[in-house]
Amino acid sequence: MIQRIQTIYLIVSALIMGALYMWFPVILGEDGAAVMERDEPLVFGLVFISIALTIISILSFKKRQLQFVLNRLNIISNFVLLGVFVYRSLTLSGETLVSEKGIGVLLPIISIVFLVLANKAIKRDEDLVKSVDRLR
């Protein structure tokens, strides 16, 4: 059903990834300007893939196994995005002793947490359906 708790978790995950792309600069330089822009093709592609997988997962609420697999793929894409952020922040040229990393670096981690919570809720639903099928 679409009104289950995993749908809430998935919507929050999609909103977090949308907020990452729309409002928050990813990495800020010493002067406050964004060092890594959100318009880079790799960042845009990974954020788009994450949002698209989340929406597809929400719409496939009748197929719990597919939903579970899509969420795992989404977790992997968020880890890749996090890896890109960490790599780019560690290899900046002209890095000073103090550089401010934006909140955008933490948003994939928060999204991963909500995706894991959604997967746990999906697994709980699947176990409930299997237990009811055993009673018949």
Image (cartoon, rainbow, N blue to C red):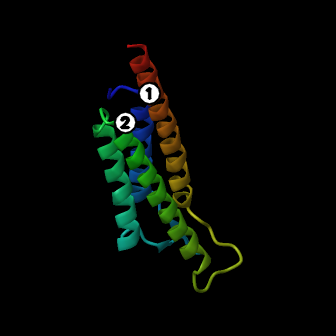
Q: Is residue 19 above or below residue 135?
A: below
Q: Secondary structure at mark 1?
A: helix
Instruction: Report the amino acid beneath label 1.
Output: Asp
Q: Which mark is residue 92?
A: none
Q: Secondary structure at mark 2?
A: helix
Q: Is residue 31 above or below residue 124?
A: below
User: Residue 2's spot in the image, x, y percent?
Assistant: 32, 29
Q: Is residue 109 above or below residue 114?
A: below
Q: Residue at x 59, y 65 (%)?
A: 101
User: Residue 28's spot in the image, x, y percent?
Assistant: 54, 69
Instruction: Report the amino acid beneath label 2.
Output: Arg
In the current view of this chain or complex, which residue is farthest to the top? 136
Residue corresponding to mark 1? 125
Residue corresponding to mark 2? 64
For the image shown, how many numbered marks are present on the structure?
Answer: 2
Q: Which residue is more in the foreground, 112 or 63?
A: 63
Q: Kindly report the distance in space between the C-alpha atoms of the residues bearing marks 1 and 2.
A: 8 Å
Of label 1 and label 2, which has the lower sequence position? 2
Q: Which residue is more in the foreground, 79 or 129?
A: 129
User: Residue 120's spot in the image, x, y percent?
Assistant: 51, 36
> In screen coordinates, is 41 left or right of 84?
left
Q: Which residue is more in the foreground, 115 or 99?
A: 115
- The answer to whether marks 1 and 2 mark residues whose Cβ atoms lie closer than 8 Å is yes
In the current view of this chain or complex, which residue is farthest to the right? 97
Q: Residue at x 36, y 65 (%)?
A: 44
Q: Residue at x 43, y 30 (%)?
A: 126
Label 2 CA crowd tier, 10 Å (few <14, some 14–19, many 20+): some
User: Which quarter of the image is occupied by the N terminus?
Assistant: top left
